[in-house]
Image (cartoon, helix red, strand yellow):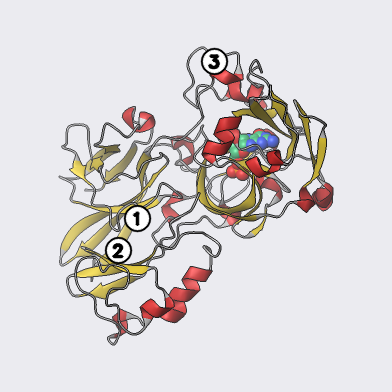
Amino acid sequence: MPWTRRLFLRRSLAGGAALLVACGEGAEDATDGGLSLLDGGLPDAADGDGPTFDAGVVEDGGALGDGALDAAPDMMVVDCADPFEGGELLEILDFASGDQPTFHRSLGQGWDGRLYFDLRQVDEDALLTPTEQFFVRTFYPDPLDPDRAGEWTIEIEGLVDAPVSLNVADLEPRDMGAFVLECSGNGDFSQFGLLSAATWQGVPLSEVLADVGVLPDAVAVKISGFDEHDVPSRNGHSTPGAAWVIPLDQVEATGAFLATGMNGEALPPDHGLPVRLYVPNWYGCACIKWVDTITLVGADEPATGQMIEFATRTHQPRPAPALARDFLPPSMDQAAMPVRVERWQVDGETLFRVVGIAWGGYAVTDALEIRFNPDEAWQPVDVCPPMRSNQPWTVWEHVWQPAGPGLYQVRCRVADDAVPTQRLDVGFYDRVVRVGG
Ligand SMILES: Nc1nc2c(c(=O)[nH]1)N[C@H]1C(S)=C(S)[C@@H](COP(=O)(O)O)O[C@H]1N2
Ligand SMILES: [Mo]
């Protein structure tokens, strides 16, 4: 699945800020190539002798001047108003809802091991999560030895001509694109810190299966991962056995892949060294780490313990279906929420800047709206530059002038019935902010 690369350079201009958008396909060099292009290839408008921009969108090949387009034929300029230009950032508000967790530090053990990502850091020019801050759910199993990751094999068995032992070291990983990963159990308790974005390197699962003699009765593939830890999960929070069954047509449709790298480096132990499953736009519980077995299964394959454990969180019918084939794809609907609320002083006036993200879903939408309390009207969010892709996520901002001090319950919606938003519909991503008096 191609990722539309969006790299930004905010430029001070009379009456607005222009954003440079690199919209090339393919993410070969998404983490650095494009940025170095911006660093080296473009003069800075703020220093007075940079290029001048017309208002509106300059299409590819439009007049950018100074040869910048020669260096970047796939660039265009989107002119986005910047109401905060010349202002002063006074404060980043805390969200009053949920807990105030410790971010970017390993907490707990084994299955209960967590690392929460601080979503306040997401910005137009910081779309990807640094690997060491990428959220973790379940730490590297203690019985495994990272020094022996090079010997790792995946057993491919079940409804196949002959079982295959696949050497992970023999895979030829390529850039698969930039995608978000979200734990289906994400929530306010972690300030929604079980959500992150990275580029992923790996090999399509369909390609791996193409090299195996899959028997005609096989309709799905069960992906299992190593899942033993010395320390049991507290309160039986997590049950042992990490496996998810994916119908073969979904393997194709989703572009599921075996990932061996993220953000251009080998997977760190906690993220699945040496190999994990990643299914674009499916919740993290399906993205099995430390994959050790791939089983081709038939139509009557029972749901795995992991699928049942996560049935509610992945919005399955109730009670959880007994058979894997009756599970819905554990996909993420379109979602959106504020990640940072800033208080600014602009021209003697107090203005609030709400920065948010939109992620998940399979359709690009321009109908994002925000509401600052249940009794207030919905306001359209002018997402600029507009959403171009569902992955990894779109950063938006919204100018807010609260009616007065107090608590505000902020919710987003998509004003388009054709876009499913089941979590937004029930207020799952509501955030509460306190505006001081
Ligand atoms: N083997 C194994 N794989 C696993 C899990 C696990 O406990 N064991 N947890 C799953 C869940 S619930 C999530 S949200 C993701 C988290 O991936 P991350 O820790 O790399 O962010 O891993 C998934 N893969
Ligand atoms: Mo999860």
**Residue 310 versus residue 143 in the image, above or below:** above
Side of 394 where 168 appears, left or right: right
Examine the rendered structure and indicate whether residue 118 appears above or below residue 300: below
The residue closer to the viewer here, 234 or 10, is 10
Q: Position of residue 180 (x, y in %)?
A: 50, 46
Residue drawn 75% across the image and 37% down it = 212
| Left or right side of 436 for 138 | right
Instruction: Please name which of the two marks, 1 or 3, marks the residue nearer to the observer.
Output: 3
- Report the residue marked by disc 3: 320
- Going by the numbered disc 3, the residue's amino acid type is Ala
**One can see residue 406 in this view:** yes
- Which residue is depicted at the point 50% across and 22% down? 312
- The answer to whether residue 42 of the structure is visible from this angle is no
Can you tell me whether the CB of the residue at mark 1 lies under 8 Å from the nearest atom of ligand 1? Answer: no
The answer to which quarter of the image holds residue 285 is top right
Q: Residue at horizontal 35%, vertical 43%? A: 337
Residue closest to the far bottom = 49
Kindly identify the amino acid type of the residue bearing the numbered disc 2: Leu
Say the numbered circle drawn on residue 208: none
Query: Disc 1 marks which amino acid?
Result: Ile
Label 1 sits on a secondary structure element that is: strand
Along the viewing direction, whichever of 60 and 432 lies nearer the viewer: 60
- Residue 92: which numbered mark, if any? 1
Identify residue for label 2: 89
* C-beta proximity under 8 Å, tags 1 and 2: yes
Q: Residues within 10 Å of mark 2 (few under 14, many from 20)?
A: some
Task: Provide the secondary structure element on which disc 2 rests.
Answer: strand
Mark with earlier residue (3, 2): 2
Check contact, mark 3 vs mark 2: CB within 8 A: no
Total of numbered circles in the picture? 3
User: Measuring 35% from the left and 31% from the top, which residue is drawn there?
Assistant: 420
Mark 3–mark 2 distance (CA, rounded to whole Å) = 49 Å
